[in-house]
Image: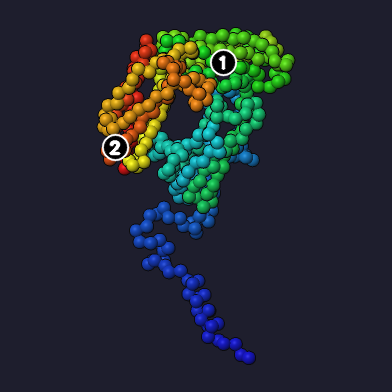
Amino acid sequence: MRPHLAPLVLTALLVSACSKSPEAPGGSTHAAGESDRTFDAAAMLDPGTKGLVVIDGFPKRPTYWDFDRVAYGARVTHAFRMRNEEGREVTILDLLPSCGCTQASVRYTNAKGEVESGVRGGEKVLTIPKDATFEVVCELDTTTSIERMNVDKLAQVRMRTDAPRAPYITFELHVIVERAFRSVPAVIDLGEIPQSAGKARRADVSTESVEDTSRVVSIASVEGPFVATIDPTDLQGRAFWIVVAEAQKGLPLGPVRGKLVLATTRADGTTPGAPFELPITGQVVPDVVAHPALFAFGAFERDALKEVSIDLDALVPGERIAFLGAEAKGTGANKLAFDRMPIEPGAPEALAHDAANAPKWKITLKTTSDFPLGPFSGTLEIKTDHPRVPSIVVPFQGVAK
């Protein structure tokens, strides 16, 4: 049986048509008005076009840099010097570090002697002119961004470009962050500090390694409105130091920050070691505070009603407060009702007693069935018998739909 020729002829014609690309006038593959930056594959094959070249790196591993051993807390930087040998300008599309400890940027000096730079972001980082020398700057933060101390770490930065010969280049940074001591917790966070009483908190300091015989010898200094003590002790044959930092009484309201610096010795017991720093933070507040500090109703259906609660806390240990009343002011205030319940810390809420005073009160603000539609806001002023905090003003806001 003879094969049908029509399908074969049609297939041959289609293949022939698809194999030909239409050309712009003059034989150019560029569309009219297109930028000269459009990549020309034939030009990239000319001799001398080598891509993006590292010009001063290690010969056998040009995109690698070894910071070696670095003390904890240092910020170390290395700039990979490169040259654009793509035969055209190249755009750095993005810089992607492998972890939060590393930051990267690109910079070069233009024909006017001005430094142009770009960092990782939503837009293209930087465009490098043809034959220009530029730098990929990698900065490593050796503080809390480093997960483990005294071990090898390899951070990476991936650079993506529009260069066909170098669409991806990965830079590697090796480091060993050295630290003899550690603290649990790493920061003494005092949290809310009652203004009239101050507040103290503890941290335990020990060596990073069980075998390390380095020692803490004293408190070298205390920065900020704090005092501190240190108590050396031993647990199952391992030395550690109990540090207590205390915010002083009567400080101004607002955030407080500082640090505790400990003097140390190296493993030989005599040579001074690197000082160990322990940050201290906190917030000085009135002796009675609201948690949270807002009645947030959000958006709700008016017919469904809505209630929001806060806790009124006496922060000074042993103090108790009496609830003397509350007054709402603002939009919709006359359509709000409130309720209160005394709370004993550590006791289930169901066992809360109807006492005249308590260390904590649960205050509930409620809407009514005829609450007006639309946004509303205002304040609830709560009266207490506390000698230093006779009233607390807590805002409220929401939208009734």
Q: Is residue 166 above or below residue 317?
A: below
Give the numbered dot on residue 371: 2
Q: Residue at x 55, y 29 (%)?
A: 145
**Residue 18 on image: x %, y %:** 49, 72
Q: Residue at x 30, y 23 (%)?
A: 327
Q: Is residue 103 above or below residue 83?
A: above
The front one of 66 and 294 is 294
Relative to residue 114, is residue 152 drawn left or right? right
**Residue 290 on image: x %, y %:** 40, 23
Q: Quadrant of the C terminus?
A: top left
Q: Residue at x 28, y 30 (%)?
A: 333
Dot 1 crowding, Cα within 10 Å, few <14, some 14–19, many 20+: some
The front one of 270 and 143 is 143
Q: Quadrant of the N terminus?
A: bottom right
**Residue 305 on image: x %, y %:** 35, 38
**Residue 30 on image: x %, y %:** 40, 61
